[in-house]
Amino acid sequence: MSEKTERAAAASEGMNILSVICTGLAILAFLGGAGVFLYEVFGFVSGNGWNTLQLSDLLFALLGPPPQVAEMGAGSRILAVLSLAPLDLGLMALGWIFSKIGNLFEKMS
């Protein structure tokens, strides 16, 4: 009987750790989105124009150049559509998603 309770406690602790990790990623993504937004606003306020950064800039930096059109699969097409979104909104949405995942892990623990 005590072995089952030890396993349950270990599983609960693992879920708590995953919850903390997802919550941390949510905070980082949301702060990153807010930072990008402030950078874009700074360009507008300073008279340099609105500095628009697309999600494609981040995807290009992380994943490399996109494949050629003939080699695009469904995943690449989804990423191509997402790359049209602004970076700040994309990061904030990613933070919201990580927050919901973290809440799910917290409820499971």
Image (cartoon, rainbow, N blue to C red):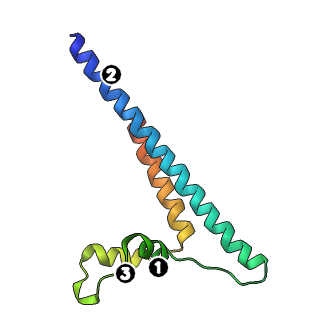
Q: Nearer the viewer, mark 3 or mark 2?
A: 3
Q: Which numbered disc, 3 or 1, marks the residue closer to the eye?
A: 3
Q: Look at mark 3 in the image and give the residue it sits on.
A: 65
| Image location (x, y in percent) of residue 109 | 37, 30
What secondary structure is marked by label 3? loop
Q: Judge left or right: residue 98 versus residue 38.
A: left
Question: Could you tell me how far apart the alpha carbons at marks 3 and 2 are, in whole angstroms?
Answer: 45 Å
Which quarter of the image is occupied by the N terminus? top left
The kind of residue on which mark 2 rests is Ala
Q: Which residue is mark 1?
A: 84
Mark toward the viewer: 2 or 1: 2
Q: Residue at label 2? A: 9
Q: Position of residue 44 (x, y in %)?
A: 73, 79
The image shows residue 100, relative to residue 38, as above or below, that is above
Marks 3 and 1, how far apart at CA: 15 Å
Q: CA distance from mark 2 to mark 1?
A: 45 Å
Q: Secondary structure at mark 2?
A: helix
Crowd band around label 2 with a 10 angstrom C-alpha radius: few (<14), some (14–19), many (20+): few
Image location of residue 79, percent across then percent down: 36, 74
Q: Earlier in the sequence, mark 3 or mark 2?
A: 2
Give me the residue at 52% from left, 63% from top: 91
Q: Is residue 81 above or below residue 105?
A: below
Does residue 52 lie above or below 69 as drawn? above
